[in-house]
Image (spheres, rainbow, N blue to C red):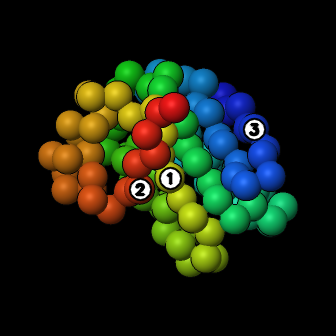
Amino acid sequence: MELEIKRHPDKSVIILEKNVIIGSDAATLQNAVLDLIQEGSTTVVVNLSKLNYITSWGIGTLFHALTTCRNRDVEFYLSGVNQKIHDILEKVKLLQVFNIMENK
């Protein structure tokens, strides 16, 4: 998985550079989240604006990143959630679990 990471004083943003998240991407995203936490980030945002599709394993990957952050008192947000991804998260009852950051 290709990632771009932008560090800001108030948050770190992980931009997924791939249009699909599948199982083999799990370790890359999880390692990026762990690295940002170790660097002292208090808020992690995963930008999904380039994502066209997500598998159930990809959803699990995002959920794992969420729980990793919560267990370390780090805020976790999704941004750039398109309607297709929104509908998938709603269908699997995770829309209320993730904090969705509106695009600005």
Q: Is residue 41 visible?
A: yes
Q: Position of residue 101 (x, y in %)?
A: 46, 45
Q: Residue at x 73, y 38 (%)?
A: 5
With respect to residue 89, does 98 lie above or below?
Answer: below
- Residue 99, quarter of picture: bottom left
* Residue at mark 1 to residue at mark 3: CA–CA distance: 14 Å
What residue is shown with label 3? 6
Q: Could you say which disc has been placed on residue 68 in the image? A: none
Give the residue at mark 1. Answer: 77
In the rendered image of this protein, does residue 22 appear above or below residue 59?
A: above
Sequence-earlier tag: 3 or 2: 3
Q: Which mark is residue 99?
A: 2
Q: Is residue 61 visible?
A: no
Q: Secondary structure at mark 1?
A: strand
The amino acid at mark 3 is Lys
Decide if residue 35 is on the left or right side of residue 90.
Answer: right
Mark 2: amino acid: Asn
